[in-house]
Amino acid sequence: MARKPTSLIPRTHRELCEIAERWLLGSQRCRVAIAEPNCIVTDEHPDAIGFSGEKSVLVEAKTSLNDFRADLKKPFRVNPQEGMCDYRYYICEPGVIIENDLPERWGLLHVLPGGKVKKIRPSARFHAVNRAEEIKLLAACIYLKKPLKIR
């Protein structure tokens, strides 16, 4: 697949995060979802994260290939057991990240015109997950009254 941008006006990082949040609440049936939690209590700062009774799902929004490549160097990407969530995805517009770029177990979501999300590759479950970081992040969001979307 060629790396050719598919839209004349690329989506912003914030727009991708909001789309990811809606996807978490909808397609992933998460009961709670947060776009850009930005809580400084954790080392990992997910762009969107969702929780349901049996799973947690992380989504990283990428607007460029360089941003994606920089993300791969983070400690919790190099050592996936230090990362948050049972399922992990990258979300971008088509042409930014292709399936062959992905680390093992990661899924890929493309945002199509109109904000529709197409799952290019599903995430495999990560069995070693940093639950303590997830709990710290969720607790900090509640404490800071960060807007949580609850379904």
Image (cartoon, rainbow, N blue to C red):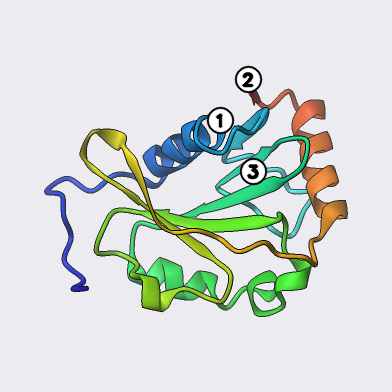
Residue type at mark 1? Leu
Mark 2 vs 1, N-terminal side? 1
* Location of residue 103 with respect to 6 vertically, above or below: below
Q: Position of residue 73 (x, y in %)?
A: 57, 78
Residue under pointer 3: 38
Q: Which residue shows up at 70% across the image and 72% down it?
A: 80
Residue under pointer 1: 25
Using a 10 Å C-alpha cutoff, classify the residue at mark 2 as few (fewer than 14 neighbours), some (14 to 19) or many (20 or more).
few
Residue type at mark 2? Arg
Q: Quadrant of residue 65?
A: bottom left
> Residue most toward the right?
132
Q: Quadrant of residue 140?
A: top right
Left or right, 85 with reference to 67: right
Q: Position of residue 76 (x, y in %)?
A: 70, 70
Mark 2 residue element: loop
* Location of residue 10 with respect to 115 vertically, above or below: below
* Location of residue 10 with respect to 105 vertically, above or below: above
Mark 1 vs 3, N-terminal side? 1
C-beta proximity under 8 Å, tags 2 and 1: yes
Gap between marks 2 and 1, in whole Å? Answer: 7 Å
Residue under pointer 2: 151
Q: Which residue shows up at 82% across the image and 28% down it?
A: 143
Mark 3 residue element: loop
Gap between marks 3 and 2, in whole Å? Answer: 21 Å
Q: Quadrant of the N terminus?
A: bottom left
Give the label, 1 or 3, closer to the camera: 1
